[in-house]
Amino acid sequence: MGTLYIVGTPIGNLGDFSPRAAQVLRSVDFIAAEDTRVTLKLLNHFEIRATLISYHEHNAATRGPELLERLMNGESGAIVTDAGMPCISDPGEGLVALCHENGVKIATVPGPTAAMTALAAGGLPTGKFLFEGFLPIKKGERDAALQAIARLPHTLIFYEAPHRLRQTLAALLEGLGERPVALCRELTKLHEEMQRTTLSAAVAEYADREPRGEYVLIVGGAGKDDPAAGMTVEDAADLVRRLAEEGQSLSDAARQVARETGYRKGELYRLAKPPFLLGTGDFVFTVACNKIRSAR
């Protein structure tokens, strides 16, 4: 039975590549790489000669069993990603799971990760954090993902590509409300930048600024004074009702509370809506019925 080594690679600066990582890559029978072209540049820089095999999300279902068979026949292999630790927001997790299921030994050669590097540099609480990776592209799925974490006190970590940064910042502001955020881009590279600001300020800034490079977003969790903290959906619906009683339309009240709590506007509207409400007149009818019941 062979061994699969999980080998971390630099996230930008080649000086972060460890001597042990180089030694392991020189010694294994094969290296499974997300993009063999990217990995080949790294190997050439350190004069490492090795057999490269592509392993990515589009071929994992067939390539994974092939690699597993080689490992079970006694070969040693390594898995790397384009940058950072394999298996973190990366298809390598599937191969590692296969190895565990079949008794293949796993060994780790730790390296940098963009998430932990940005968390350390972001200046936000690090005691509790949640790594979300890339948010879903589809709006409905993205809204649901943000709703699920909006009330958590944990610092939140997101990855984002430059062409989607504006959209994601706007979605974070809408789904989480105003929060502190650290925008970390091009980590360990020549144009590394770490910016502490707020979500609303970041949205305004990037309306005119062209995003460049890969981003890690570190977003503050829901604070004790945050309206969303610890609020159930029923509590949020009650808040919608109170705002409506104060003069807001039910739709506007649901929209405001949804923005502050992360719950969906439609769900809050449905829960806050009086049972017989079909229109303005029906609301009056509902109130009248409630008064009659109370009188009885």
Image: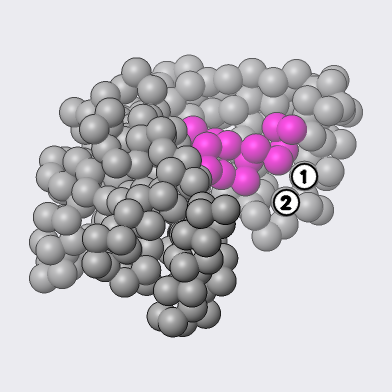
Instruction: Judge whether 199 appears above or below 274 on screen.
Output: above
For badge 2, the amino acid type reads Ala
Task: Indicate whether residue 85 is drawn in magenta.
Answer: yes
Q: Measuring from the top left, give residue 193's x and y in whole percent.
A: 15, 44
Can residue 246 be seen from the camera position used here? yes
Q: Is disc 2 in contact with disc 1, using a CB cutoff of under 8 Å?
A: yes
Asked which colour scheme the image uses, the reply is: one colour
State the count of labels: 2
In percent of the image, x 42 and y 19: which residue is there? 19
Highlighted magenta segment, given as a residue range: 84-97
Can residue 83 be seen from the camera position used here? no
In percent of the image, x 35 and y 50: which residue is there? 239
Q: Measuring from the top left, give residue 108's x and y in whole percent.
A: 58, 20
In percent of the image, x 24 and y 32: which residue is there? 225
In the depicted view, which residue is nearer to us: 87 or 21?
87
Q: Measuring from the top left, give residue 269's x and y in whole percent.
A: 46, 65
Kindly identify which residue carries mark 2: 60
In percent of the image, x 64 and y 18: which residue is there? 107
Q: Is residue 107 left or right of residue 85?
A: right
For badge 1, the amino acid type reads Gly
Q: Is residue 141 left or right of residue 66?
A: left
Kindly identify which residue carries mark 1: 64
Instruction: Judge whether 276 appears above or below 49 on screen.
Output: below
The residue carrying pointer 1 sits among few (fewer than 14), some (14 to 19) or many (20 or more) residues within 10 Å by Cα, namely many
Locate residue 123: give its quadrant. top left
